[in-house]
């Protein structure tokens, strides 16, 4: 394992303060006056019924969506009103996101999908490629590096998405049902990788319906 992969991480404390959100102005509130503090070095799982707002909360915490009311803090800094460019820069520099259904770029190879987020975060191309190959190897999909996402299985695609999220060595990892397409053994590998990342100091926040995995987290937040 490389030196980079064993570097300890500081993580980012995530907070919400009276956070509310509606997808449309004046529309139904998905989240109402939510107050949370999520600590570095921990895995937090978000559970709750389908449609309760777990994915929405991940999008808010990761700065993909702006809050309707209230605030979101990263290490105490209010981030909900930052300009879009700054939010994108912070996302790329500090976080990785494993989306539901992988969401890989179908026109690019598996390797390029993983490298892309590192390049976007300003990581040197040679380093990005070496880290990407190392992660693909670690998760047993290096033999698919030159394939397109349409040529790999759902479970393999989900592992590629995990590699893409980890390639920047992020301080925060968000996962939206990251084990949803996986069999029990593969799900455990993904979970262990996320738990390892938290053990190194990162803040890890995972939305999941899998109660077995959720129970392994340091903290379970029920979104209602
Ligand atoms: N882009 C959108 N526009 C409008 N409403 C949306 C949008 N995305 C989600 N919703 C609605 O917001 C609510 C919360 O959705 P969200 O995906 O956050 O729930 P979830 O808890 O993650 O659900 P699941 O467990 O099924 O993935 C749902 O009622 C959903 O229909």
Image (tube, rainbow, N blue to C red):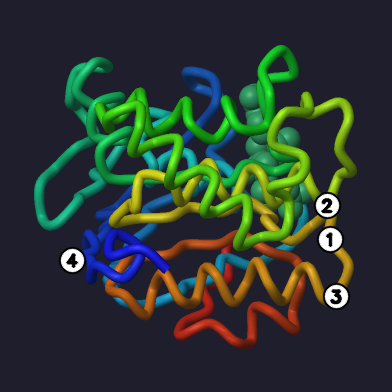
Q: Spatial distance from mark 1 to mark 3, Cα to Cα? A: 6 Å
Quarter of the image where one finds residue 10: bottom left
Check mark 2 vs ligand 1: CB closer than 8 Å? yes or no: no
Where residue 161 appears, as percent x and y from the top left, is 63, 43
Eyeballing the image, is 26 above or below 76? above
Check mark 1 vs ligand 1: CB closer than 8 Å? yes or no: no
Quadrant position of ligand 1: top right
Crowding near the residue tagged with mark 1, few <14, some 14–19, many ≥20 C-alpha atoms within 10 Å: some
Disc 1 designates what residue?
182
Label 2 close to label 1 by CB (< 8 Å): yes
Where residue 149 appears, as percent x and y from the top left, is 78, 29
Which residue occupies 85% across, 75% down?
Answer: 184
Q: Which mark is residue 155?
A: 2
Label 1 close to label 3 by CB (< 8 Å): yes
Which residue occupies 52% across, 53% down?
Answer: 134
Q: Spatial distance from mark 2 to mark 3, Cα to Cα? A: 11 Å
- Helix, strand or loop at label 2? It is helix
Disc 4 designates what residue?
10
């Amino acid at each position: 394992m490389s030196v980079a992969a064993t570097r300890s991480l500081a993580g980012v404390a995530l907070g919400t303060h009276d956070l509310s959100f509606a997808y449309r102005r004046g529309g139904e509130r998905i989240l109402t006056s939510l107050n949370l503090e999520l600590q570095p070095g921990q895995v937090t799982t978000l559970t709750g019924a389908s449609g309760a707002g777990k994915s929405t909360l991940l999008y808010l915490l990761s700065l993909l969506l702006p809050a309707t009311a209230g605030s979101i803090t990263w290490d105490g800094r209010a981030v909900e009103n930052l300009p879009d460019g700054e939010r994108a820069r912070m996302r790329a520099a500090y976080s990785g996101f494993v989306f539901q259904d992988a969401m890989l770029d179908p026109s690019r190879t598996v390797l390029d999908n993983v490298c892309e987020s590192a390049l976007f975060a300003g990581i040197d191309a040679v380093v990005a490629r070496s880290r990407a190959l190392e992660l693909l190897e670690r998760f047993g999909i290096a033999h698919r590096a030159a394939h397109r996402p349409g040529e790999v299985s759902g479970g393999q695609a989900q592992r590629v998405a995990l590699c893409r999220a980890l390639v920047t060595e992020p301080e925060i990892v968000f996962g939206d049902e990251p084990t949803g397409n996986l069999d029990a053994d593969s799900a455990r590998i993904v979970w262990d990788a996320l738990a390892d990342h938290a053990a190194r100091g990162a803040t890890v926040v995972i939305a999941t319906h899998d109660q077995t995995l959720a129970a392994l987290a340091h903290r379970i937040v029920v979104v209602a």
